[in-house]
Image (cartoon, helix red, strand yellow):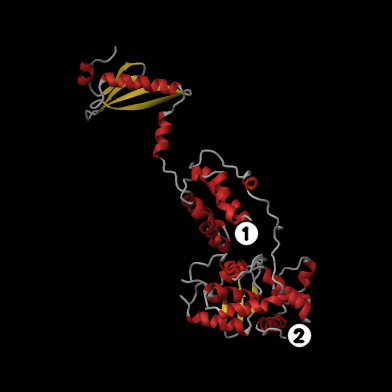
Amino acid sequence: MPLTILKVKNAKPGRHVDGRGLCLLVKPSGARTWMLRMQLNGQRRDYGLGSALDISLAEAREAASVLRRQVREGFDPVAERRKAREVIPTFEAATRSCHETLGDGWKEGHHARWLSGFERHVFPRIGRKQVDQVDSACVVEALSPIWLEIPETARRMLQRIGVVLDFAHVKGWVPEEVSLRSVRKGLPRQNDKRGHMEAMPYAEVPALMRQLAKGAPTIGRDALRFTIYNAVRSNETRLAVWTEFDLDNAVWTIPGERMKARETHVVPLSRPTVALLRRRWDERADDTGLVFSKDGKKPMSDMTMTKLLRDDGISGVTVHGFRSAFTDWSSECTDYPKEVADKALAHKLPDKVEAAYRRTDFFEKRRGLMKLWADYLQSPPNADTLTAE
């Protein structure tokens, strides 16, 4: 029998059915609530309609009628309420969560620099958007300013954005997988060749070094000079810590986990390099932290040295390209064998048999070569080219 106003008022603890799934639930405490039981996609669902103290029998029947019609039309109240309770993070928050979750399995250097590109190029443009609102058009907007200016970084950021959106989908923040295949169609064609690093002609490098030396010492300027003096990769400079250096013996030992070839690399330091390091030692934040850092903990951005070049009006040249300049100079201006220059660059021999037999690291020869390179870099304008004796 359908419920009446009197039955609702006097109902004892238990379930009291009104009809068509509507019922009154009375708890032993006396609390009374309306509930509608329905079938949705073959499953039984119970929908709460509110307290009987606030909603009358007639109002409960009207609410049940409206809800039945909505369910028939495909509306799922439970799913909608769950969705309303969920807090969708911003793209920046999702990226940082992705970095924290996945980063434990990454190499130390990769983990440290993974976020820097987002902080510099992506977060300022789309970081505040909810991650479920980030689509191909948003990614095009974020990458447009750097797509031709720094193409390799832009491609790397596109790949990393895809990782973040896949992570967000797995977390339930993005309902469907986001394809970024159309992003490239919304951006101009990149004409550079992947992996090609534009180098400054070695004859022009001393002038650049003189220009850098004239400026006030900064972390970025010191890092760039240090990188050129030692012909190392920028990340080997950026992540260098004080414990890797023996300044008394002018030696820098880079552990294998920080090297591209995964082998320890010992660098003989020239006098100008040692002098630069001793000055930075006097200004250090701590005895074991990063050499080129304000606080010894956070690495400088991977774009800092490149920005120095751009600010000085030098376009199209990469920091990595100074390794090529060193190679060209060594080949054309010294008598040192190619093997010594290759070892100075920590290049791995492609021939495994040859690598197995060549145990020497040419350390003393490399010390002589790096001294000549430092002397060349400090040479005055129009000075004669230095050669090995």
Residue type, numbered disc 1: Glu
Q: Quadrant of the N terminus?
A: top left
Comparing labels 1 and 2, the label whose residue is closer to the camera: 1
Which comes sooner in the sequence, label 1 or label 2? Answer: 1
Label 1: few (<14), some (14–19) or many (≥20) C-alpha neighbours in 10 Å: few
Compared with 169, 198 (above or below) is below
**To which quarter of the image does residue 341 belong?**
bottom right
Q: Relative to residue 184, is residue 338 drawn left or right?
A: right
SS under mark 1: loop
Residue type, numbered disc 2: Ala
Viewer can see residue 359: no
Label 2: few (<14), some (14–19) or many (≥20) C-alpha neighbours in 10 Å: few
Q: Which residue is mark 2?
A: 388
SS under mark 2: loop
The x and y percentages for residue 193 are: 72, 58
The x and y percentages for residue 42 are: 48, 22
Q: Quadrant of the C terminus?
A: bottom right
Return the mark for residue 149: 1
The answer to whether the residue labelled 1 contacts the one labelled 2, judged by CB atoms less than 8 Å apart, is no
